[in-house]
Image (tube, helix red, strand yellow):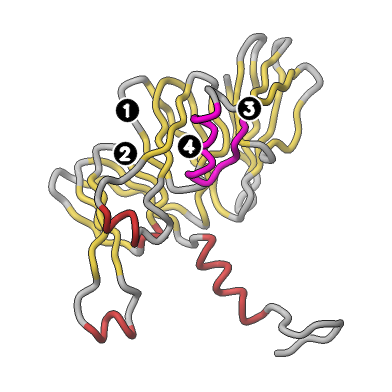
Amino acid sequence: MEYEIRGGSFPIVVCTLQEGETIKNETGAMSFMTSGMKMETNTGGGLLKGLGRALSGDSLFLNFFTAEADNQQIGFSARTPGKILPIKLDGTNTFIGQKNAFLAAEDSVELDIYFKNKLGTGIFGGEGFILQKFSGEGMAFIEIDGEVIEHELEAGETLLLDPGHLAAMEESVEFEIERVKGAKNILFGEGLFFAKVTGPGKIWIQTMPITKLAEAMIPYLPTSSGSGFDF
């Protein structure tokens, strides 16, 4: 399979498949495909697997697209302004993405729910402690909100983030939630909790989580019924 990411801040990944190759996506992300593509929809491994994906923010069903001839194309579009991040899995590396990260992947890529064991992480994880785990072999494509910063953590190196800005990480990275210290910091600072990540491993930081974008738009939304607007 070959691919090309186009579109700038409103990206689309266009994949070119040869006969017999299959790519899967969550329902609703496909924007176009050539006539030589065959589509099948199912839970991708049984009802429990589908329910696990639903808990991690994706759909219960997956679409599977198989090329019935050479050089067939299919495009998958991001749902929000941002980036599409391509991840190459070789059977030895495992990748953890935020809730709703999954866009599309080759059929050989495994997509599972990923839990954090610590209760504090589960309750206070900002974007949620139910994450998405990518393993197996092949290409996977995930969605990033806004721009993306890639950072390599050395062994023992620690970084604190607003939980919503942690888009993805390698499985070797330790992740936990740390409470902000000090009453003034809690009341007037950046919130109650930080995401604490410790290396070794790579992390991807997103600049505009969709939750913050939604909050920023609230003051500009109409507040009265009818045709008028309150400013």
Q: Earlier in the sequence, mark 4 or mark 1?
A: 4
Taking the spot 20% from the left edge, 41% from the top edge, the residue there is 200
Residue identifier under label 3: 15
Taking the spot 74% from the left edge, 18% from the top edge, the residue there is 38
| Stretch in magenta | 47-63
Residue 73, given in percent of the width and then of the height, sits at 71, 24
Taking the spot 70% from the left edge, 11% from the top edge, the residue there is 70
With 132 as the anchor, is 122 left or right in this view? left
Q: Report the front residue among 169 and 10.
A: 169
Q: Give the numbered dot on residue 93.
A: 1
Q: Earlier in the sequence, mark 3 or mark 1?
A: 3
Answer whether labels 2 and 1 touch (C-beta < 8 Å). Answer: yes
Residue 144, given in percent of the width and then of the height, sits at 50, 49
Q: Is residue 48 magenta?
A: yes
- Counting other residues with Cα less than 10 Å from the Cα at mark 2, is it few (<14), some (14-19), or many (20 or more)? many
Taking the spot 61% from the left edge, 50% from the top edge, the residue there is 8
Residue 213, given in percent of the width and then of the height, sits at 55, 67
Residue identifier under label 4: 52
